[in-house]
Amino acid sequence: MTTKFIFIFVFFSAFFFITNSAFAQEKDFIVVLDAGHGGKDPGKVGYKKSKEKEIALKIVLQIGKLLEKEKGIKVIYTRKTDVFVDLWERGRIANKADADLFVSIHCNAHNSQAYGAETWVLGTHANKQNFEVAKAENAVILLEDNYQKNYKGFDPNSPESVIGLTLMQEEYLDQSIQLASIIQKGLTADLKRKNRGVKQAGFVVLHQTYMPSVLIETGFITNKIEGPFLNSKKGQQKFSNEIYKNILKYIQQLNLNTIKNEIVNTDKLKKTKEKIIKKEIANNFENVEFKVQIASGSRKLETKAYNFKGLKNIKRVKVGNTYKYYLGLTQSYSKIKELQKLAKSKGFTSAFIVAFKNGKKIPVSNILKKS
């Protein structure tokens, strides 16, 4: 048996194992639902003394009940009763469960008659208004025991502390924004809420999690019309149904993208797999450079190993208002696969391979097919 034959046999065996495993995947999609505040922390107090902690919990429990009926979805709650839960504990619950999604439900308040829905993702924008919103939500850590130890000196009143949040959650920023956009569109188009947009700020509860995460400000309980609606059974049911529906929509889009990107059309694969194998034996792709994208976000970080869990040879590239961070540079697809594996072993679980030809980014799948 020749070496080439052995290589082809192993390649086909691995391919069919991976493909069949993808279709036979039995792991549940885990959604962590977080009802903001609770216990000694009432959150915002609104029109006719309505409390944010009570409204958020009722909406969360209804969302969870709907999601639990869906096959393949597992729901975990940070709280199911009126108890106080530390922000770091909420994140720990999600991380321990290896969750796929973290959704935190809140209500807004203002000394005016402001109204409308907004959805937040983690960000470190030096925006005073956004900082004040995050500051109000983060202030709950002052009620926690040993908060200085648990948050390593984080000061919710300090803009520098907020800006100092690490890049870890920003690995999932694109997916968080995708989810936030779907939810925000649903709340405004279907539920007819005023659109206050998808925004970014330094929320500690989002920073503690290592998966796509959003915080939903459903509406203003201080508004004379929106407050009673949020505090009503009918209003809570409408919000719950809408958020549930849009979480499902996000999951469906995620699954569709996975199928498109990772499970190549069988007919096309049959026509190209021999070419791919031959090129893999040759190993190198001329005029093509591969990199591993390990993170992207709004922060400009020094490309030092200590900022990237010990990884070296990191390059930073600015694309619009976003910085992308790449590991490695090679013409060898085999070598770049090894670097992707290394990045994932360091905790960058969403690391993916990108390809450039003559300085222009092109789909990796195109390179493999054309080869």
Image (cartoon, rainbow, N blue to C red):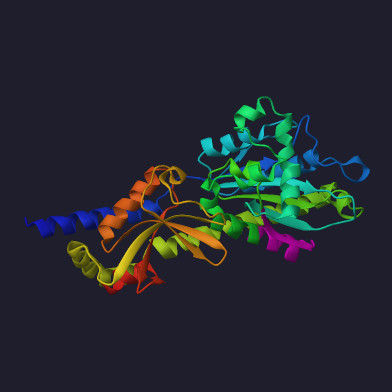
Give whichever of 113, 265 is nearer the camera: 113
Note whether residue 211 is visible.
no
Quadrant for residue 205, please give it.
top right
For the record, the magenta segment spans 182-200
Position above or below: 287 against 243: below
Comparing 352 with 227, the one in front is: 352
Which residue sits at x=75%, y=32%? 82
User: Could you say which is closer to the camera, residue 371 or residue 157?
Assistant: 157
Residue that appears at 7% across and 57% down: 2
**Residue 330 horizontal side relative to residue 216, left or right:** left
Q: Position of residue 81 (x, y in %)?
A: 73, 32
Residue sticking out furthest to the top: 145
**Which residue occupies the extreme left position in the image?**
1
Looking at the image, residue 298 lies above or below residue 40: below
Q: Is residue 253 above or below residue 224?
A: below
Residue 145, position as x, y percentages in the image? 68, 25
Query: What is the quadrant of the C terminus in the image?
Result: bottom left
Which quadrant of the structure image shows residue 78?
top right
Direction from residue 337 to residue 258 in the image, left or right: right
Q: Is residue 327 magenta?
A: no
The quadrant of the image that shows the N terminus is bottom left
x and y percentages locating residue 245 in the rendered image: 65, 56
- Image check: 76 left or right of 22? right
Judge left or right: residue 344 versus residue 225. left
> How far from the left and from the top, in percent, is residue 114?
86, 56
What residue appears at the point 21 percent right and 68 percent down from the top-left corner?
274
Q: Is 196 colored magenta in this rendering?
A: yes
Q: Residue at x 89, y 53 (%)?
A: 223
